[in-house]
Image (cartoon, rainbow, N blue to C red):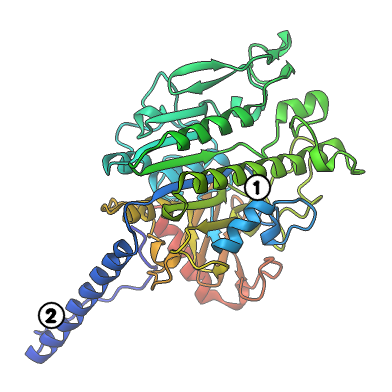
Amino acid sequence: MNHPPTTSTRPTTAPRPRAGRLAFACTLLAILIGQTIQAASVRADQDAQPNLIYIMVDDLGYGDLGCFGQETIKTPNIDRLASEGMKLTSHYSGNTVCRPSRLSLWTGMHAGHTAIDSNAPYVLKESDVTVAELLQQAGYTTGGIGKWALGNTENSGHPNRQGFDFWMGYLDQGEAHNYYPVKLWRNDQKVPLPGNVLSDATLARGRVSTQRTTYSHDVMTEEMLDFVRSQGDKPFLMHIHWTIPHANNEGGRVNKDGMEVPDYGIYADRDWPNPEKGFAAMITRMDGDVGRLMALLKEKGIDDNTLVVFTSDNGPHSEGNHKHETFDSNGPLRGYKRDLYEGGIRMPTIARWPGKIAAGSTSDELLAHYDWLPTACELAGIESPTTTDGISFAPTLLGQTQRSHEYLFWSYGPKKAVRIGDWKGVIPGKDKPLELYDLSNDIGETKNIADQHPDVVEKMKQAIAESLE
């Protein structure tokens, strides 16, 4: 489905000479044998079907982790993931906002082929095929916690109807922006959170708590750890969709502390506004829970047969009275959440698998969230759907030759973007001309050089048109 933007030519009708036919057949056979050997090599590198843990946090920027250049906020456990695994420095989100980014991840489709390319409501259909559903069919026990946003108990989009044996967290995206909700969902059952009370003025909207006792992140984290503890010899898939460090937008307007966290921890005495203390404390709290998870894998003796991937759903936000500039959350990149410049879509991504992924390694292979579905399928030893826009990046993780994307594509309403090699094309809005950047020497997208390279601009336009077919 992801075809290169090339100029087609009509093939000749003249018969191919016998020697030419033989050489062509030999070349084709060699390619097929090579692909078969590579797939077999990936499978041979696994002692058994590995456990797969995919961590996607919410609105974390490329520059928010110590291992990606953050100097103020402390993330020692995630930094350890990077030192023991691989940093994926050109790994992109499926979109620049929450719901379509998750839809891209679940289904293996880029934004030109998903049902939505914005935060418009969408319910997963029975005909949609998710990575959880595929792995469930491959014999995996499947679990997830956190923000879902693609269905509820009354329709086909509920996670239990989309491949998850277990789900704990938020179903409604709006409720997920409150860290002190009155309830979460365990599968199709409401789980009241003790001590969280809504004010009369906001009860109908169900978002802002005036009495706040039970922090939702902590509840979901304990459920996630219990799921991992309960697993036996059968392989499992765990999707961790923590809502940190998304802002409580409603709370930010009510109490000016839209970055909700039980305490400010090591940042309590900093001379910062409270929302900035909250933002930093949320990330460090989440980092501590990554450490707890890794300790549990070692305790259970499954560390060596578990792949852990860490990423974010989109770029950093400036919401809840927090400003992304405070901690340089987008690092060297331009833009943030809702932009299709690099800051809105390039994610701080890490993969760790002891004995399989080289410790302290880095890859700049062009990858995206929609590559997770085929990757998980390959590692589970099953075929990936032919309709996916993704490419398995298992070879990259295992130090093997990787088949590369011809291009990556994004759509956010009228905004479009495409990356071909080091070239990046961006249409920043309705009726706006395409901007062109050379990321090899301008990662901050500061110099629009579209007028200097009309041939490249034309390739970008072809790729965009093809991606929307």
Comparing 258 with 241, the one in front is 241
Mark 2, secondary structure of its residue = loop
Q: Amino acid at mark 1?
A: Leu
In the image, is residue 266 above or below residue 122? below
* Residues at marks 1 and 2, CA–CA distance in whole angstroms: 55 Å
In the image, is residue 374 above or below residue 114? below
Q: In the rendering, at what x and y percent does residue 229 appear?
A: 47, 36
Q: In the rendering, at what x and y percent does residue 459 appear?
A: 46, 70
Mark 1, secondary structure of its residue = loop
Q: In the rendering, at what x and y percent does residue 467 appear?
A: 41, 56
Comparing 189 with 100, the one in front is 189
In the image, is residue 281 above or below residue 125? below
Q: Tell me which residue sits at (31%, 54%) in the image.
A: 48
Residue 60: mark: 1
User: Alpha-carbon neighbours of circle 2 within 10 Å: few (<14), some, or many (≥20)?
Assistant: few
Instruction: Inspect this view and state whether residue 122 appears.
Output: yes
Comparing 394 with 171, the one in front is 394
Q: In the rendering, at what x and y percent does residue 63 appear?
A: 70, 57
Q: Between disc 1 and disc 2, whose residue precedes? A: 2
Q: Tell me which residue sits at (39%, 70%) in the image.
A: 402
Reading the image, the residue beneath label 2 is 13
User: Alpha-carbon neighbours of circle 1 within 10 Å: few (<14), some, or many (≥20)?
Assistant: many
Instruction: Inspect this view and state whether residue 341 appears.
Output: no
